[in-house]
Image (tube, rainbow, N blue to C red):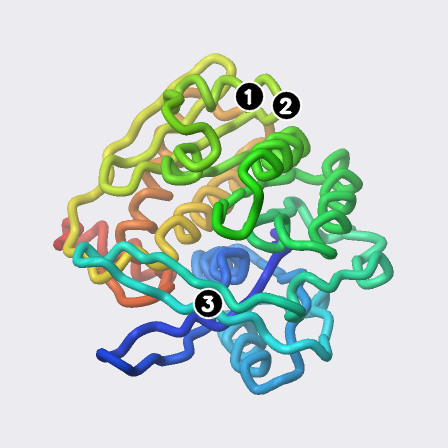
Amino acid sequence: MILVCGETLADLVPTGADAFRALPGGSPANVAVGIARLGEPAAMLARISRDRLGSLLRRHLADNGVDLRHVVAADEPATLAVVSLDEAGRASYSFYANGTADWQWKPRELPAHLDDVSAVHFGSLAMTLAPGAEILETFMQRVRDRHLVSYDPNVRPALEDPAAMVQRVQRQVGLAHVVRASTDDLSALYPGCAVDDVARSWLDRGPHLVVVTDGPDGAHGFTVHDHVHVAARHVSVADTVGAGDAFMSALLVGLARRSSGPPDTETLRVLLHDAADAASWTCMRAGADPPRRDELTQWRADGMPD
């Protein structure tokens, strides 16, 4: 089972000039749903509000087969993210997160044992916002010796001091075995630096695989010995909401079904192609709607139409 640790939140997605629809979201929650839809057991470690939006989030996870045994029922309200889309369907977010459920972790709320878990994924705002981020980072350090640990920083520069953001991300990169980041993340963290240079510097901190996604230009995978690039599928884009999360889900599923340790060149190429296909599928649909395994298989069999 893959355990996903982080936030669940409600995305307020525009449906007109002055109208929004509340949809389940949050990068880690999207990753958990994506894993489950691809046929790999997934569980969520999150604090989910008892309020109406929290009920929506909990139901969405359960309906998609995500195990909720490690979910904490929280008295604080759910977090909101207001989504804005540009003319190309690229999403940006404004967050309403002060005092909300996702960040109020207490050490006693974290599981003492993860006997049925093969990998633990950490990500996004839950690894950023106080007071919970420090507690989750300590948990990340605790589980890394017994489980594969993956990490997606999914940085939000508006929510954090730039210097502190770089220090935190580098520290958390050093606790992970697998890291995925976007070129937008790298640009925010290290303006003007080449992707290759950043990836190599992160590998020096301890991960055995660093993946950098680059939207329509595909993805790069780096190990100590390899650099593999795969192109993205050219599809009709509804929006990019959840595309990176779908990529992360498929990457984790692929790693879970292969031997541990750094992948060889051909294995890495296959992993990246599969993950890029999942991201492309998600871009063709509005909102965070990652593919199910049979949908992705059929899409490939049909020649992957736009």
Which x, y percent locates residue 173?
Answer: 60, 32
Of the two numbered discs 3 and 2 in the rendering, the one whose residue sits closer to the viewer: 3
Structural distance between the alpha carbons of marks 1 and 2: 5 Å
Between 246 and 51, the one lying in front of the other is 51
Q: Residue at x 66, y 32 (%)?
A: 171
**Crowd tier of the residue under label 1, counting other residues whose Cα lies within 10 Å: few below 14, some 14–19, many 20 or above:** many
- Quarter-of-image position of residue 66: bottom right
Q: Secondary structure at mark 1?
A: helix
In the depicted structure, whether residue 41 falls above or below residue 250: below
In the depicted structure, whether residue 303 falls above or below residue 208: below
Q: Secondary structure at mark 3?
A: strand
In the depicted structure, whether residue 227 falls above or below residue 185: above
For the view shown, which residue lies furthest in the bottom direction?
52
For the view shown, which residue lies furthest in the top direction?
225
Which x, y percent locates residue 34?
Answer: 45, 58
Tag shown at residue 206: 2
Q: Residue at x 23, y 59 (%)?
A: 284
Structural distance between the alpha carbons of marks 1 and 3: 32 Å
Residue designated by label 1: 203
Q: Earlier in the sequence, mark 1 or mark 3?
A: 3
**Crowd tier of the residue under label 2, counting other residues whose Cα lies within 10 Å: few below 14, some 14–19, many 20 or above:** some
Q: CB of mark 1 within 8 Å of CB of mark 3?
A: no
The answer to whether one can see residue 230 in this image is: yes
Which x, y percent locates residue 43?
Answer: 62, 61
Amino acid type at circle 3 is Ala
Q: Residue at x 36, y 80 (%)?
A: 21
Residue designated by label 3: 81
- Quarter-of-image position of residue 138: top right
The answer to whether one can see residue 177 in this image is: no
Between 100 and 47, the one lying in front of the other is 100
Of the two numbered discs 1 and 3 in the rendering, the one whose residue sits closer to the viewer: 3
Which x, y percent locates residue 298?
Answer: 25, 57
